[in-house]
Image (tube, coloured by chain):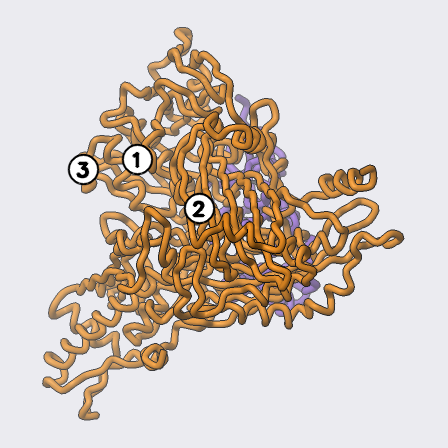
Amino acid sequence: MNKVKRTWQINGEEHQTEIPPVRRFLDVLREDLGLKGTKEGCGEGECGACTVIVNGEAVLSCMLPAGQVPENAEVTTVEGLEKTPGGRLLQAAYAEKGAAQCGFCIPGMIVSSYAMLSRDPSADPARIREAHAGNICRCTGYEKIVEAIQSAAEQWPAGTKG
Amino acid sequence: MVMAVKELGTLHSVGKGIPRLDADEKVRGLAQYADDLNVPGAWYGFVVRSPVAHGRLRGLKKDPGFDWSQVVVVTPEDIPGNNIVDLMGRDMPFIAHDVIQYLGEPVALVAAASRHLARVAGSHIRADIEELPPLLTLQDMVARYKEDPAQLHELASQTIRKGDTEKALSEADMVVEQEYSAGHQEQLYIEPQGMVAIPESDGTMFIHGSMQCPYYINPELCETLDIPPEKLRVKQSAVGGAFGGKEEFPTLLAGYCALLALKAKRPIKIIYDRNQDILYTTKRHPSWSRYRVGVMKDGTIHAIQTEFLLDGGAYTTLSPVVMYRGILHAAMGYRCENVAIDGHVYRTNTFPNGAFRGFGAPQALWAWESMIDELAEACGMTPHEFRLKNCLHQGDSTPTGGILRDSVGSPTVLEKTLERANFSEKLKQCSHGRRGEKKWYGIGLSFFAHGSGFTGDGEARIKAKVALDLEPGDDGKPVVNVRVSSTEMGQGTCTILPQVAADALSIDIRHTAYPMPDTFKVPDSGPTVASRTAMVVGSTIFSAGKKMKAELEAFVSAELFDGQPVVLEQDRFCGSYGDKEMSFEEAAAQYLSRKGSLRVYDQFKLPEFIKWNQKTFEGDAYPAYAWGCNVAELEVDTLTFEIRVTRVTSYWDIGRLLNPVLAKGQVEGGLVQALGYAMLEKIEIKNGKYDADRMQTYVIPTTLDIPEMDLHFVEFPYEHAQPGAKGVGEIPMDGLAPAIANALVQATGIRMRDLPITPEKLFQMMHEEKTA
Ligand code: FES
Ligand code: FES
């Protein structure tokens, strides 16, 4: 099969890959690049566990052919969050509020939170719920997740993308 | 009680909302779930399945045109031991060899270097099957039961008898009869099932993966693999949710991997995709209940007669025990001296149904708590008056004649919830399907208990074993490792057990740790099920901690403090002469360097006064009960019939709260799962297949479906198992569906007796009512 060459900035580091363009971006991250923090919960775009950020947009990596991730794209996965002040804030809030139970939805969930707050650091629970409606969690009932995001939003570093 | 309070006086971890000890690795994406394990040289396994639900297997055909040299195939002839899954009934083979009992039953296993190749190879194997007529649905099962139960294949049955129910029914002022049913529910943990089997050079088979109960897989696999238990090592990876779905099922997956690994002589990994996971794993049993209840004019319950049926699926597995818990909750919560309950599990040709949070109690309570409202109405009483009049109090007897001796949260949780929700006032505001309104409002109540721990003498038989190891940690500093087979699957084991250990020792929780269970390192504390970890395993850890404390105090006294009496308190050893003190860390390091590591064992003992007859189901069905009460409020859109639960108010007595933040998380998550069970989650069988086999078609609650939740605890600690927890894992799942159905009656006048409660059904029933 034809392969394409891509260079991406993943979590602030440059990665060069040569991949079949139809390979799922999720598999490229997990299997080719060893970034196993991103999870597969359904493989069909329904659960949000595979959420990553590509050029500022939260996307479902299980539905994304790697060939469609543009050259020089900036990619953030759960592993990259701790390199940013906003990401660290979210991680601390999730931990402190008890937002993670089994933790399997969390990489996708917290990446969605980071994408949302980077654009709209709002602590309004309705907006938070709306922005996370595509991230399914079977453990928590979402209450503590919403609380954690609210608490991170209240302290969100002003004027930054996080 | 006095004793209990004194003992607990020094606690300082228990009762605090300490963040989970695994939170850091989970929020950083570092936790290693089954699919994240790096297993060099692993091949991927694939299960070849029967395309029909019932039939006789005549043989397998391997496509001669396919290159079989690059794959490994396992059929029953390759199984070294017995082709039997050692669960109850011992009626299920690992790989079918004769009769096919469900669609998707394994007929062969395949492994190859890539997932894709394994799948392709699997598609080149055809099972030649002579089809037989299948029994697929609960509805058909119940129809046959009503006609003549002898037509059904019974997998288990059990009765409960108290007093003279037939006579009491004839004495009653009124007899109310009703039937209820509920469908499948899929656990839908977000991490699909996954397992790895690694054959080691010394003949050990190492099973590593997503599971609730390492000591199920060992010994269950030993017979099949024909290896002794000491050659089977089972270790848990991080578990991305389980809810019962990873209780008995992982034995199957471990078996598939291990059988392939033996033949391929290399590690084998199987990770189900979502579609396989929904189609080919256990689900909550569909259920049917029929009640005849005799009440007196004053609202007293005089006689309860009920049948409780479960659709077991194809094989026995855990169904008998699920049914036992069902019948033990089917008339629980209220005073009545005449009770007759008949429980049955029948075979259908679907994947065997199994463990799911609540384990039969949600099905039983769905029916019983709906029935209670119907009884109240028949007596001309409000739902709360009727419950307050009949509910059990301390000293009363349960349907099996057990006495509620202590730690009884009834009627407190009921009274407090009613008050908090302003139930009696709001009940008057309900719409009752009035014409001309845009929205109908309704409020509904449910009240229930959940037995803590195994049913009956289960805990006495299992005798949960635990160990605490004082040993050097990764950083060289002394650490107290909690060694139990109780797993962390999101519910909080990895935090509450160290909390309990820390308090028993009176040390800072940072000196404790919970390593992932590995059967080569931990004793058998029993499975992580039945809301038993906090109460049973927790209390055993507590007493092990006390033993370790005494041992360390003796050491410090004899070897460091010149023989003076020593107490370990608040992380410090203090000599009684007041001149010597040493931190736990320093003294423990001294212990390690002088004597090496220290292991302390302990074992759970049921209080002697707990008596149970497993044949007649008489006596104390559980050592203790947790109690809960839900008030649900909802709105129905009168145009679309959309039903929206707006608010849930509840109080819970789960004994001592070990960690309020984690406990509340359990209640929130459990209520939302119960909301899904009540209103969203639905699998039907169309053309012999489940109609929901993906997350797009099997819909569970999202952030947008969540009602406001007003949740509170009252503590009635269980004093016979320090520090007094009664378990919270399952009870939140138990009672929301009936509260919603009861609220729906107040909103619309329509009584829904089949789960889930959907706008389509409501529309249909309102339409039928109009035309009737
Ligand atoms: S794995 Fe991508 S949405 Fe579920
Ligand atoms: S924490 Fe388990 S799925 Fe969200």
Which of the image's four quarters has the C terminus of chain A?
A: bottom right
Q: Quadrant of residue B8?
A: bottom left
* Dot in front, 1 or 2: 1
Taking depth in this image into account, of B35 and B535 the one nearest to the observer is B535
Of badges 3 and 2, the one in the foreground is 2
Specify the amino acid type for callout 2.
Gly
In the rendered image of this protein, which colour is used for chain A? purple
Q: Is residue B6 left or right of residue B33?
A: left
Mark in the foreground, 3 or 1:
1
Q: Residue B525, how many percent across, how many down? A: 29, 54
Tag 3: amino acid: Pro
Mark 3 burial class by Cα count in 10 Å: few <14, some 14-19, many 20+: few
Q: Which residue is mark 1?
A: B86
Q: Secondary structure at mark 3?
A: loop
Contact check, label 1 and label 2, Cβ < 8 Å: no
Please tell me if label 3 and label 1 are on a single chain: yes
Q: Which residue is mark 2?
A: B244
Please, which residue is most extreme toward the top here? B64
Task: Tell me which corner region of the image, top left, top right, bottom left or bottom right, holds residue B354.
Answer: top left
Label 2 Cα crowd, 10 Å radius (few <14 / some 14-19 / many 20+)? many
Measured from the top left, where is residue A146 in percent x and y? 61, 60
Determine the colour of chain B: orange
Q: Residue B168: x percent and y percent? A: 52, 53
Q: Tell me, yes or no, if residue B404 can be seen here.
A: yes
Q: Going from the N terminus, do you reach mark 3 or mark 1 first? A: 1
Do the numbered discs 3 and 1 sit on residues whose CB atoms are within 8 Å?
Answer: no
Query: In the rendering, which numbered label is found on residue B228?
Result: 3
Disc 1 residue: CB within 8 Å of ligand 2: no
Query: Above or below — where is B85 with respect to B289?
Result: above
In-image side of A127 versus B504 (left or right): right
